[in-house]
Image: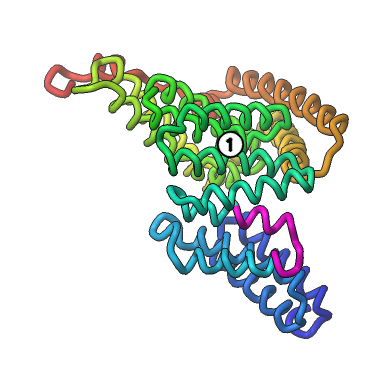
């Protein structure tokens, strides 16, 4: 197929290889495949097909750079190039999504607000409610960064977006929104409300992780939200003037232990060790099947063009599957201590740990 087949077939092959590598967190490999696909369409003088591929190249370049240079000028140039292609060929969906990415490079500047508002207008004209929720969240954060006095307005905008995301069944945007709400409340001088919101965000992120169908996907999904644990601890310890009291220390310790337990579970899942431990239990296979169904519904809710009736039907089906999975998980935890230890660990409180130590250790 590559490099001598028909252009469209070669593009499908490279796109498939890129998407597979991306799903496996092999970002450098994925970036290489998408760059080859972009060059293919450049050679074929087909900017319409090249435009969304350039967007993927920019997104993956950000993944490859990771936390070292998340907003470097080189990355911004890739998104700007992708935007030029999208505008040139009239790919409105790609244009809106790229504008939101560019907005994150300019938080604290007027351009961030302008890009987010342009993206929001595009998505409203296209009738894509999923992307509209995303745009509203980015706009709210852009306004907040530009004017700290707009915190109350930003919180209201974010709350409306989160509610819309809940109604649409978009767990990803619910979690992003709750995290953004916590930031807005913190910067607006409402630390206790911010702490409550960040705990909601943690619960939502863990829910997303738990319904992923594959061990390695669960580990990757959760790692994307790991910084929220640090954010929660910071808020708890800095919420009051002076030294944090016993309650704050205990709560921060609980978050730390919650993060540690999840990190350990990530390592177990990434190595697929839990599958080896529980493969003799037929219920494990049944549960994985339920999780696969739930994941498919989530993809449809996030990316599908659905009527209100279709979306409502999927949400009801998802709710039923979640209840079924929860019952099965509870049964497995009661009868299998290995499953219980991995999926429902008991997290000790700070006083419990202190009582277990000798006086000179506590």
Q: Which residue is mark 1?
A: 209
Image coordinates for residue 85, horizontal then vertical, percent? 68, 69
Image coordinates for residue 39, horizontal then vertical, percent? 67, 79
Residue 260 visible in the snapshot? no
Q: How is the image coloured?
A: rainbow
Q: Horizontally, is 271 left or right of 299 in the view? A: left
Give whichever of 238, 358 is nearer the camera.
238
Q: Horizontally, is 252 left or right of 75 in the view? A: left
Give whichever of 155, 277 is nearer the camera.
155
Image coordinates for residue 93, horizontal then vertical, percent? 73, 55
Q: Residue at x 51, y 60 (%)?
A: 62
Relative to 115, does residue 250 appear above or below in the rendering? above
Image coordinates for residue 132, horizontal then vertical, percent? 68, 41
Element marked by disc 1: helix
Q: Which residues are magenta?
A: 87-99
Give whichever of 70, 332 is nearer the camera.
70
- Magenta stretch, main secondary structure, is helix
Tell me, yes or no, whether the highlighted magenta stretch contains residue 89: yes
Location of residue 102 (image quadrant): bottom right
Q: Residue at x 38, y 58 (%)?
A: 68
Tell me, yes or no, whether the highlighted magenta stretch contains residue 10: no
Q: Residue at x 64, y 24 (%)?
A: 329
């Amino acid at each position: 197929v590559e490099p001598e087949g028909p252009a469209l077939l070669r593009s499908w092959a490279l796109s498939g290889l890129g998407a597979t590598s991306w799903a496996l967190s092999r970002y450098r490999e994925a970036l290489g495949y998408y760059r080859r696909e972009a060059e293919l369409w450049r050679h074929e003088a087909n900017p319409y097909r090249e435009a969304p591929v350039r967007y993927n190249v920019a997104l993956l370049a950000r993944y490859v750079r990771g936390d070292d240079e998340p907003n470097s000028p080189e990355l911004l140039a890739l998104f700007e190039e992708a935007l030029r292609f999208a505008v040139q060929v009239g790919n409105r969906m790609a244009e809106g999504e790229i504008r939101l990415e560019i907005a994150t490079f300019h938080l604290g500047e007027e351009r961030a607000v302008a890009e987010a508002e342009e993206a929001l207008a595009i998505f409203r004209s296209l009738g894509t409610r999923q992307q509209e929720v995303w745009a509203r969240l980015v706009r709210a954060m852009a306004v907040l960064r530009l004017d700290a006095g707009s915190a109350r307005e930003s919180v209201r905008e974010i709350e409306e977006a989160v509610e819309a995301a809940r109604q649409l069944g978009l767990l990803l945007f619910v979690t992003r929104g709750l995290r953004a709400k916590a930031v807005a409340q913190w910067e607006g001088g409402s630390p206790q409300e911010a702490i409550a919101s960040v705990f909601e965000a943690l619960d939502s992120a863990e829910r997303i992780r738990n319904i992923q169908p594959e061990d390695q996907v669960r580990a990757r999904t959760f790692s994307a939200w790991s910084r929220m644990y640090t954010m929660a601890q910071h808020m708890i310890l800095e919420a009051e003037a002076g030294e944090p009291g016993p309650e704050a220390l205990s709560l921060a310790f609980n978050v730390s232990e919650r993060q540690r337990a999840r990190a350990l579970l990530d390592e177990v899942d990434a190595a697929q060790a839990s599958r080896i431990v529980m493969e003799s239990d037929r219920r494990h296979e049944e549960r994985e099947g339920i999780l696969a169904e739930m994941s498919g519904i989530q993809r449809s809710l996030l990316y599908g063009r659905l009527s209100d009736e279709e979306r409502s039907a999927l949400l009801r089906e998802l709710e039923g599957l979640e209840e079924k999975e929860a019952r099965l998980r509870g049964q497995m935890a009661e009868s299998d201590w290995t499953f219980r230890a991995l999926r429902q660990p008991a997290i000790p409180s700070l006083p419990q740990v202190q009582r277990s130590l000798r006086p000179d250790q506590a």
